[in-house]
Image (cartoon, rainbow, N blue to C red):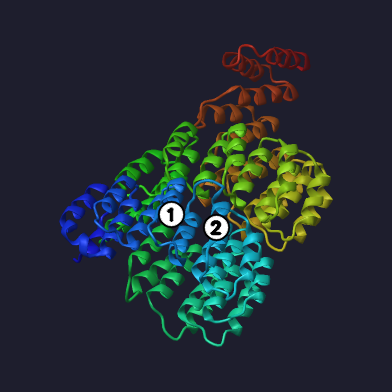
Amino acid sequence: MDATELLRSCKTLPALREANARIQHLLPNSALLASSLIRAYGRLGSIRDSRRVLDELANPHPFCWMALLSAYASNGLLDEAEDLFHRMPEIWDVVACSEMLLAVARSPHGRRSPQRARAIFDAMPARDSIAWTAMVAAYTSAGELARAHSLFLAMPEHDMVAATILLDAHAKIGDAAAARALFSAMRFTDQISCTAMLTALGEAGHLEDAERIFAGMPERGIVSSTAMLVAHAQAGHLEDAKRIFDAMPAVNVVASNAMLYAYAEAGNLRIARRMFDEMDERDLVSWNAMLSAYAQAGDLHEASRLLDRMKEWNTVSLTVLVAAHGRAGNLGESKRIFDQIQDHNVVARNAMLGAFAQAGHVGEAQSLFDSMLERNVVTCNAMLAANAQNGHLEEARFLFDTMQEWNLVSWNTMLDGYARLGFLDYALELFSRMKFRDLVTWNTMITANAQNGYLGKAKSLFYQAQSRDIVSWTAIVSAHAQHGEITQASRFYLSMPERDLAAWNAMLAAFAQNGHSRTACELFPGMKMVERPDDVSFLLVLHATGHLGEVSRGLSLLASMSSDYGLTPRKLHYSCMVDLLARSGYLSDAQALIDSMPYVEDAMEWTCLLAACKGHKDVHFGALAAKRVLSLKPSNPGAYVMLANVYRKS
């Protein structure tokens, strides 16, 4: 291993200092090695060591000065970087200025970076493509896309790197129109620029535009084909992804990984695993893609088995499991795996932060957040979600307002926090300020208004939305049902381009809860032909069956849950059945079901039985039920009133 590779292999300060001691004698005669060492110390956050290396050199090469400048800036020490920049001996040239610009542009600290960068840019005696690109990057990283766009158009010669930075920035905020306008203004359309453009359009969800560019490319390399393949995969267009994969003249591990990712994203674990097992060549990305597929599907057992088979794994491998266990609510396991990670980078910390948020451990999430020296928008979004989802809206809004960078997830998280807790005025204020909205945004507002009884507003938003999915349609069906407008609910339901379990349940609820019990029971068999019902489906049909008084149907439904669908009846299912038996006059059977159900009884079941005894004039069971109600809830005066009514009726 040569000296440069030795430095690259150092992941910790002790290891780097040991390597420093081994190569110390080489530094005076190798400016490249010395500058690499300075940058390595900067990468690990030890600015003091970076400065020491420079100070120990008798006559530091300009490379070394620029390496220290970059180390200062990358650690957020922009004042020190600028001071060093102005003191650098006789190297105030385009290269040094460009290095300073790059350092400022890359710095994630503070909002003054674009202004500082522009001051340097304007003072430069001459500017090369690196300087122009760095200035574009400074504006885009600060979210000032209009200025970045104008600067790009003013470049003497359009640079592909600058164009890609801008296209990527537009894609991240879903602004495909701006990306298209930029692409049209570019003075080159080579394979690289076309690939960047189709990637931007793909990420923004504009697959038709991306396909047009892809189809018009005179040459399609593996990179452009893979980019188009991934775009289709992320959009869930598995057949299109497979079409591109099959048409590729040569397939390497990168393309195979992309297709593996496509199957995994589509949830086709069996096919993904078969492809993984048949791959001639696998790299760590392949293993991590398969690991992630199992983790995303919630199959943590198989994910752990796969990890045990891996000859090598990295931070990504373990981070996938940290996040997966967090989503599954296994906070202890997330923490155990997180502690095994040697390099707690920002991605790993974000995963752990998400696990704390998922478990509702806001305090621990805040402690981890406060300890993070490096944060990105994902970090802030995770902390935002921890506060918003647990009702800490003031803390969430303070964080939102002080974030240096936002994306659609940031806005949607804050919007959802307000909407879920019924603060629709705050939600509307935020919604009106959003420059870009996606389906999540529209669905959040439609659902919030629907659930809070604002049918007119929910319908208005539904029709305003640029696109709709099953969630949008289901929300508007439920909104009409809550207002008792069953005909309208049915009309929207029948107009849905596709239906999932939630949509079927929404229509079942509309019928069952609005006096159309027979229709609800008739809808259920048709539902079972296309969707596997869940416990909510059975609860709704049991509720409808209870109003019809069909005991045999009710008993059949309760038995079918476990025998046909492997579902465990919840306490509410037993309560519905108790009510059905009691109201139908099967009082002893109702009592037997209460005594035999695998849940602790409460006053609700016995109150159902007591209420039924009035209609059936059964004093014996009435007295028994009243006694049990009062033993479970002594402060319930209604039990005495109902028992008195039983005696009066009898």
Other-residue count near label 2 (Cα within 10 Å), few / some / many at <14 / 14–19 / ≥20: many
Q: Position of residue 79 (x, y in %)?
A: 46, 46
Mark 2 residue element = helix
Is 383 or 231 nearer to us in this picture? Answer: 383
The correct choice, above or below, for 397 with respect to 635 in the image is: below
Mark with earlier residue (1, 2) = 1
The correct choice, above or below, for 118 with respect to 231 in the image is: above
Please name the residue that numbered disc 2 is placed on.
Answer: 138
* Residue at 58% from the left image edge and 44% from the top image edge: 535
Residue 85 got which mark? Answer: 1
Which amino acid does the dot numbered 2 rest on?
Ala
Can residue 217 be seen in this snapshot?
yes
Q: CA distance from mark 1 to mark 2?
A: 18 Å
Is 240 or 394 nearer to us in this picture? Answer: 394
Q: Position of residue 18 (x, y in %)?
A: 18, 51
Is 172 or 293 nearer to us in this picture? Answer: 172
Q: Position of residue 358 (x, y in %)?
A: 49, 41
The correct choice, above or below, for 194 with respect to 595 in the image is: below
Q: Are marks 1 and 2 in contact (CB under 8 Å)?
A: no
Horizontal side of residue 46 vs 96, given as left or right: left
Horizontal side of residue 624 vs 311, given as left or right: right
Which amino acid does the dot numbered 1 rest on?
Phe
Give the quarter of the figure containing the N terminus: bottom left
Horizontal side of residue 329 vs 409, given as left or right: left
Residue 206 found in image quarter: bottom right
Residue 536 found in image quarter: top right
Horizontal side of residue 94 vs 637, given as left or right: left
* Residue at 65% from the left image edge and 71% from the top image edge: 182
Mark 1 residue element = helix
